Each structure stands twice: as C-alpha cells, then as structure tokens.
Amino acid sequence: MNRTQKPLLIAFLGSIGVGKSYFAKQLAPRIGAVRLSADAARLGMFGSIEALKSQPESHGLDNNKRLFGVIDYAVGEILSSGVSVIYDTARYNGADNRRELKRIADAHDAHLVYVWIDTPRDIVRERVMNREETADQRRLDETATNRILAFHDEHFNPPNGDEMVIKINGQDEFEDQYKDFSVQLEQGVAANE
C-alpha cells in the first residue's frame, strides 16, 4: 500500500484487549511498516513475564518515561529513513500523549494516523483474561483487568477533528479490518494534503 510518499505513523486508541496487536502484527508486513510493541519492549527491560508480574514498578511513571523515551527515539529514527511505523501500545488515549506523538510525526514529515478499534467490553475482558502470554501480551486476572480498563476509561480523551482517526471493528477478521483501514486511510490522506 503506497498511498503517499510520506511515511505513516500509526498509533492506537482504545484499551487493552481490543485487538491492537492482532491488527498491528498483520498490518506491518502488508504496508511495509516497522511495528514497535511497548509490551515487548517492557518485557525486554524486565526479562520475563514473571519478572513483570512480580514488579509493579515495571509500569511505574519513571519506567514508563524511560521506556517510551527509547521507543519515541526509535520511532523518529525509523520515520527519518522514510519507513512507516506502527506504534503498538494503548498509550495514546490521552490528549497530552497524542500532542507529543504529533510533534514526532511533524518533525519527520509523517502522516499521523490513529486506529480506533471498537470492541465490546465483554469481549475485551474475555480476551485479556484468557489470552496466551507472549512477548506482546500478558494474561490478567479479573481484578487487574477491571483496574486497567477503569484506568483507560478515566484517562481517555476523545480525538478532536484535527486528528486522522480510522475506526475498525475489533470483532472482524483482519482482511475486513484491512479493507476498512485502506479506504479510510485513502480518504484521510487525501483530505490532509
């Protein structure tokens, strides 16, 4: 998909379990993008899922600043080489974080695109509590799941009219999601040029 000469910086809106990694893993090779997973990077910092679970500070403010500082640097370097990036994290629900990402996109002349994956909460809960643990995801118990979902709800700021947002159904198969993504991307890029 070469819809533009500018690289894309794709980030996500939504909570854990909506299907960000499912979509990002399949989208990256389809559009020739590099996928950067915050969960995999966090695992790299702490060594194992067990270490993450035993260290609540792994998601603390200081560690998040370091983690996202390194990833943001990598995003800029990749974009500066003209390659698109998919930033696989739930970090961009807040307006302040989205302003920072816009600064990175603007500095590297990239189209900033948010993908909002719409998935019902009962399905999100089921996914998070029953998923296989990998470098990209952890299984959480009901208490942790509800706590994280409440945190996401509390800190979510809806996108404004200036942000390019592509909304896809989190229950669809990837091919249907990709069709919706492609159509909306084409329209969004055309409107922003």
Image (cartoon, grey):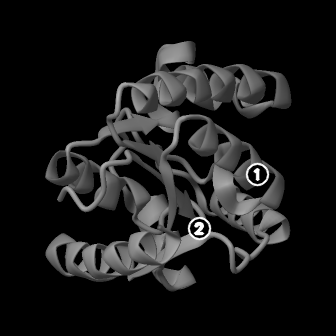
- Kind of residue indicated by mark 1: Arg
On the image, the x and y values in percent for residue 69 come to: 68, 23
16 and 182: which one is in front?
182
Q: Residue at x 33, y 53 (%)?
A: 24
Residue 22 appears in which quarter of the rendering? bottom left
Q: Is residue 143 above or below residue 51?
A: below
Q: Residue at x 47, y 67 (%)?
A: 193
Q: Residue at x 63, y 69 (%)?
A: 163
Which disc, if any, is residue 99?
A: 1
72 and 193: which one is in front?
193
Q: Is residue 64 visible?
A: yes
Q: Around disc 2, counting alpha carbons within 10 Å, would you say few (fewer than 14), some (14 to 19), or many (20 or more)? A: many
Q: Is residue 162 above or below residue 41?
A: below
77 and 167: which one is in front?
77
Using residue 88 as the reference point, say whether residue 148 is left or right of it. Answer: right
Residue 162 appears in which quarter of the rendering? bottom right
Whichever of labels 2 and 1 marks the residue nearer the N terminus, that label is 2
Quarter of the picture containing the N terminus is bottom left
On the image, the x and y values in percent for residue 98 come to: 71, 54
Q: How many marks?
A: 2
Question: Tag 1, which secondary structure?
Answer: helix
On the image, the x and y values in percent for residue 18 come to: 47, 69
Q: Is residue 8 above or below residue 130?
A: above
Q: Residue at x 66, y 49 (%)?
A: 102
- Kind of residue indicated by mark 2: Gly
Which disc, if any, is residue 14?
A: 2
Using residue 68 as the reference point, say whether residue 34 is left or right of it. Answer: left
Q: Is residue 117 visible?
A: no
